[in-house]
Structures are given as structure tokens and as C-alpha cells.
Image (tube, helix red, strand yellow):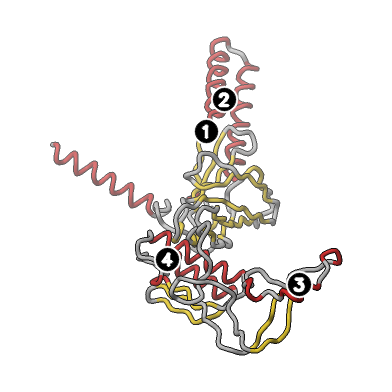
């Protein structure tokens, strides 16, 4: 008898899973492309105010029956009709909204990753008071209105602490419009993730003049003197044109100038992870490499990059910087795609 009962309950659970699995999104499943909030994706339940209103209706009904109050019955059913209309409008405030993920820029560890989400309303019904945030947030912080045949963009922030890919929790959209007696909500898990770079080291040593990790200075040839130019951040003090500086009157707007050379053989700036002291922590070495990449770009110095099996020839620019920072962010991780 017990075995038959367990088989029956197991069959019932299996039937329930098969039935709901046809329309209920599975936990952990990523939503790709544009997602439409159909009736199968929207849930609705009475809010606290709605439960209190239901208790009030029950009291009115009992009182009307007890004392045979015709106006009491009319008031009770009128209020019930308003609650049912509110339930329909609360559901319609989310129904048929179209959701799509936007840009997710890369950030450094410690910064807040910004996930851009687009909500589109292709119907003639305006939507008001749509709350949206990640499910693991203590409370929903963002609310938006979407006009008829309109759209809205929402930026959701997630704090970061470690490098690598950041996959946020699923997004919850909810509304209690118009009367607040019901709460309708829906889950959405966009296939968006943020790339988190290592945190740049504070007070890092100066840029190396070679892959040895020692020494610093302005990289450039010094065989043929070509003249002087205005001082730029990073110029070596040895290259300052002191004679020309002495002739300039500070009261007339005098400034530092630097000797400019052409030709000659220059030291190549190489940022080599293997050249860093082995006793340093892995994350600290990655942070130092990150700082050096940013410093080299700020000074417009072409630099070669070496990190394990990743080698980049000397270059400069946004694309080179992004490639180096990406390699640093994903170093040693199983998923580097």
C-alpha cells in the first residue's frame, strides 16, 4: 500500500514538472535575444494591502448578510468588482513588454558594473510604475514608466570585488499599478555578463625600461639633437633643457622645456609578467601589470605585453589596451572566452 502511494505521489510530481516545464522558465536558463512577457511568464498575487482589502470585504459581506442590508451588498460587490478590475490592470501593466539586453562596459575590480536593459512597449497602453532590479538586491531601486509605443532604458549596477566574468542574478520586474491590491512580477535572466579587470595597484613602481622589471625613464633615441619642446609628464629630468629654462622669465609665463632627440636606438618597453618578483601574490602581480598598462597608455608609449602564452608586439591605443586588460582579467581562469 505504501509503495503504491509513493509511486502515485512520484507520478503526480513528474506530471507537474512536465506540465509546468512547458511554460515556466527553468532556473539558471539564460534568455537570449528579445524576450516578450507573455502570460506564462507573469505571476500575480494579492499584496498586503490586497489581503487587508479582502478581509474588509469579508466583514462587509457578513454584516450585510447578518442585517440584510441591500446597500451593504451593493457596496461589497462594487468594491469586489473594483478589486477584480485592479487585478486585470495590474497584469496588463507587464503583459507584452519586450525586454532586451544592452551594453555592458568592462570595469575594474572595486567599481560598479553597469548592465543596460531596454524595455519596449509596442502596444497602445502606457505602462506606469514598473519596478526593476536584480533578484538578490535587498529592495528594488529602479522604477520607470513606458509610454504607449515607447521604450525605456534602465541601468542596473552590481558591485565588483574580483576580476573575471561577472554573471549577475536574474532580473525581477514587478508592478502594483494602479491600486496596489495586487503585485504582478516576472523573472528575466539576460545572457549578459561584465568583464572585470584587475584593480590597478596603488603606488606601483615606475614603468620598466625593459622586461627586467627594473629601471625607468622616457623611452626614445638620444643620438641626434632635434630641438626643444614643452615638458610632458614622464619626461626624464636628465632631458630637461636647463639653459633654455634659465632664459625664460617665469613672470612672462615661462615653463619647463625638454630636449628632443631623433634617431638612435631606444629601449623597448616590455611589460613581462614573468619578470615580476615571484614572491609577490598572483593578484598583486596582475594589479601591477594593469597599472603599468594604464600608465603606458597615458604616456602614449608603445609597449610589448607578455603574460604566459599571450604575447603582443609593441603597440599603443585603445584596442591594444583592451586586449592586454582582457588577458589580465582572464588569466588562469577556465573560461577565457
Whether the residues at callouts 1 and 3 have beta carbons within 8 Å, the answer is no
Q: Position of residue 110 (x, y in %)?
A: 51, 52
Which residue lies at the image location 58% right of the left edge and 15% below the top edge?
A: 64
Q: Which residue is mark 1?
A: 46
From the viewer's perspective, tell me whether residue 172 is left or right of residue 71: left
Report if residue 191 is visible in the image: no
Q: Within 10 angstroms of label 3, few (less than 14), some, or many (20 or more) residues?
A: some
Alpha carbon separation for disc pair 1 and 2 = 9 Å
Q: Earlier in the sequence, mark 4 or mark 1?
A: 1
Which residue lies at the image location 68% right of the left edge and 86% below the top edge?
A: 225
Whether the residues at callouts 1 and 2 have beta carbons within 8 Å, the answer is yes
319 is higher (above) or lower (below) than 57: below
Q: Which residue is mark 4?
A: 330
| 1 or 3: mark nearer the eye | 3
| Label at residue 225 | none
Q: Within 10 angstroms of label 1, few (less than 14), some, or many (20 or more) residues?
A: some
Q: Which residue is mark 2?
A: 53
User: Callout 3: helix, strand or loop?
Assistant: helix
User: Callout 1: helix, strand or loop?
Assistant: strand
Q: Earlier in the sequence, mark 1 or mark 2?
A: 1
Q: Which residue is mark 3?
A: 245
Alpha carbon separation for disc pair 4 and 3 = 47 Å
Amino acid at each position: 500500500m505504501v509503495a503504491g502511494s509513493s509511486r502515485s505521489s512520484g507520478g503526480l510530481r513528474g506530471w507537474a514538472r512536465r506540465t509546468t516545464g512547458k511554460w515556466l522558465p527553468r532556473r539558471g536558463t539564460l534568455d537570449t535575444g528579445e524576450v516578450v512577457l507573455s502570460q506564462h511568464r507573469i505571476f500575480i498575487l494579492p499584496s498586503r494591502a490586497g489581503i487587508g482589502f479582502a478581509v474588509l470585504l469579508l466583514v462587509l459581506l457578513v454584516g450585510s448578510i447578518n442585517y440584510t442590508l441591500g446597500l451593504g451588498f451593493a457596496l461589497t460587490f462594487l468594491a469586489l468588482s473594483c478589486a477584480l478590475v485592479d487585478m486585470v490592470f495590474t497584469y496588463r501593466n507587464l503583459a507584452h513588454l519586450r525586454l532586451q539586453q544592452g551594453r555592458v562596459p568592462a570595469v575594474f575590480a572595486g567599481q560598479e558594473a553597469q548592465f543596460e536593459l531596454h524595455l519596449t512597449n509596442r502596444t497602445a497602453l502606457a505602462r506606469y510604475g514598473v519596478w526593476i532590479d536584480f533578484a538578490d538586491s535587498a529592495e528594488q531601486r529602479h522604477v520607470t514608466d513606458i509610454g504607449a509605443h515607447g521604450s525605456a532604458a534602465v541601468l542596473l549596477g552590481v558591485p565588483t570585488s574580483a576580476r573575471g566574468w561577472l554573471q549577475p542574478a536574474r532580473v525581477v520586474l514587478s508592478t502594483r499599478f494602479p491600486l496596489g491590491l495586487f503585485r504582478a512580477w516576472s523573472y528575466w535572466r539576460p545572457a549578459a555578463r561584465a568583464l572585470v579587470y584587475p584593480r590597478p595597484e596603488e603606488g606601483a613602481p615606475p614603468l620598466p625600461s625593459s622586461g627586467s622589471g627594473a629601471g625607468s625613464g622616457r623611452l626614445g633615441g638620444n643620438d641626434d639633437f632635434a630641438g626643444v619642446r614643452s615638458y610632458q609628464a614622464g619626461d626624464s629630468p636628465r632631458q630637461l633643457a636647463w639653459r633654455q629654462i634659465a632664459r625664460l622669465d617665469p613672470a612672462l609665463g615661462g615653463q619647463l622645456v625638454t630636449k628632443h632627440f631623433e634617431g638612435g636606438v631606444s629601449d623597448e618597453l616590455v611589460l613581462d609578467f614573468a619578470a615580476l618578483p615571484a614572491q609577490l601574490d598572483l593578484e598583486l602581480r596582475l594589479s601591477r601589470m594593469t597599472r603599468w598598462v594604464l600608465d603606458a597608455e597615458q604616456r602614449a608609449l608603445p609597449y610589448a605585453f607578455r603574460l604566459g602564452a599571450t604575447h603582443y608586439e609593441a603597440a599603443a591605443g585603445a584596442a591594444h589596451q583592451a586586449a592586454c586588460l582582457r588577458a589580465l582579467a582572464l588569466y588562469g581562469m577556465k573560461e577565457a572566452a
